[in-house]
């Protein structure tokens, strides 16, 4: 048996209990799954590359968490229930010292969200991971980007900006002694996908997206698909005390909240008539929600703070810059 198949058998096969809807998992040319009646499969693929999305020296358990969360978050943004995942892993060599903690963390998180590894690939090359996740959702209720209407309120979950500050710490060792530097680095890798929030928003939210490239960039996808504009009050942005102390400025923290990628919080819109239902619907989800603005007619993109215009030249993450 080759080294590749030894690794697969040792680290990936038989690590999880089989879901009832998985007819055939890893070990054949394809996996076979059974889709329940009246549900559709939501599918998302993401790639993480060493040197771009994480340092090769990063804790492999944290890398595993980040890789799986980034994909599960896409399912959460549509209100889908996670079901299956496949993983393509490229490594320079079969490094079991790296692979063991990676797989331990990967399967721990997968089990927590009820998602089963059903296949994938391993090959030699620069360290990278490509995951394809599949979830189940009612196609009529699925959250999309094209449902926002003028007058809808704009919300975000959690707090924003910590991931960008954590990345600063990762890339600049001189920042390690700043307040909460280690905590913010941890938050960069160990985000929480808002699966329960997405499910609770079915029937309440008019549109949704997960924040992976920065709020100021990601909300524009909703605006474009829905053909609307937006007015955002930056004074309402949820930011942590740790971020403010790390940056030494609330204004700077607000800018981080707008531009921070890899947050994996949700941005969603909801009509006025559903505004009162959100708190009760989300009370069991373990995530705060904050109203940060309102949808306006197409062509509007307004940033203000307590009704005063804000003229910040900001952009989110660009994968090719």
Image (tube, helix red, strand yellow):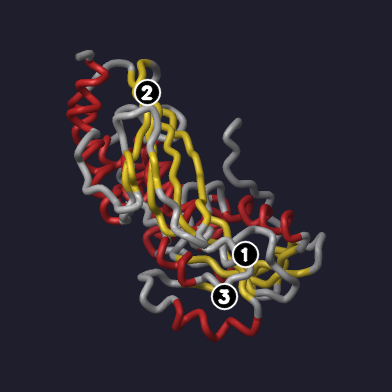
Q: In which quarter of the image is residue 230?
A: bottom right
Instruction: Identify which residue is drawn at 56% across, 74% down.
Output: 203
Image height of 40 relative to 200, above or below:
above
Q: Is residue 249 visible?
A: no
Mark 2 residue element = strand
Q: Nearer the viewer, residue 304 or 127?
A: 127
For the view shown, which residue lies furthest in the top direction?
2
Quadrant into which the C terminus falls: top right
Seen at 17% across and 29% down, the residue is 10
Q: What element carries label 3?
A: loop
The residue beneath circle 1 is 207
Circle 3 residues within 10 Å: few <14, some 14–19, many ≥20: many
Between residue 319 and residue 172, name the one nearer to us.
Answer: 319
Residue 260 location (% of width, % of height): 52, 50
For residue 204, which numbered disc appears in the image? 3
- Give the residue pinned by disc 2: 90
- The disc placed on residue 138 is none
Q: Locate residue 244, reporting x and y percent.
A: 43, 60
Q: Give residue 32's position: percent from left, percent from top.
A: 39, 40
Q: Can you tell which quarter of the image residue 153 is in?
A: bottom right
Left or right: residue 162 compared with residue 23:
right
Q: What element carries label 1?
A: strand
Image quarter where the N terminus lies is top left
Which numbered disc, 2 or 3, marks the residue that appears first in the sequence? 2
Q: How many labels sit on residues?
A: 3
32 over 312 or under it: above or below: above
Q: Is residue 241 above or below residue 291?
A: above
Q: Earlier in the sequence, mark 1 or mark 2?
A: 2
From the viewer's perspective, is 188 left or right of 153? left
């Amino acid at each position: 048996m080759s080294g590749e198949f030894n690794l697969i058998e040792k680290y990936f096969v038989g690590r999880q209990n089989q879901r009832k809807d998985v007819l055939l998992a890893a070990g054949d040319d394809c996996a076979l799954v059974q889709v329940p009646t009246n549900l559709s499969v939501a599918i998302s693929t993401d790639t993480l590359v060493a040197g771009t999305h994480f340092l090769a020296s990063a804790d492999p358990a944290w890398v595993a968490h980040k890789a799986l969360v980034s994909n599960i978050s896409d399912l959460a943004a549509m209100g889908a229930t996670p079901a299956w995942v496949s993983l393509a892993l490229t490594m320079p060599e079969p490094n079991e010292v790296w692979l063991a903690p990676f797989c331990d963390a990967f399967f721990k998180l997968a089990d927590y969200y009820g998602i089963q590894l059903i296949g994938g690939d391993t090959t030699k090359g620069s360290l990278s991971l490509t995951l394809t996740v599949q979830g189940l959702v009612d196609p009529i209720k699925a959250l999309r980007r094209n449902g926002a209407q003028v007058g809808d309120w704009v919300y975000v979950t959690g707090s924003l900006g910590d991931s960008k500050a954590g990345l600063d710490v990762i890339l600049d060792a001189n920042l390690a002694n700043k307040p909460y530097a280690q905590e913010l680095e941890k938050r960069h890798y160990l985000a929480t996908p808002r699966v329960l929030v997405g499910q609770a928003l079915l029937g309440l939210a008019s549109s949704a997206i997960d924040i992976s490239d920065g709020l100021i960039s990601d909300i524009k996808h909703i605006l474009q698909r829905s053909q609307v504009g937006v007015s955002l009050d930056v004074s309402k942005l949820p930011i942590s005390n740790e971020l403010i102390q790390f940056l030494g400025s609330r204004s700077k923290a607000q800018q981080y909240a707008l531009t921070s990628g890899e947050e994996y919080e949700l941005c969603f819109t909801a009509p006025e008539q559903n505004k009162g239902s959100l708190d009760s619907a989300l009370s069991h989800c373990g995530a705060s929600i904050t109203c940060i603005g309102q949808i306006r007619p197409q062509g509007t993109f307004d940033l203000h703070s307590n009704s005063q215009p804000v003229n910040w030249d900001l952009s989110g993450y660009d994968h090719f810059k």
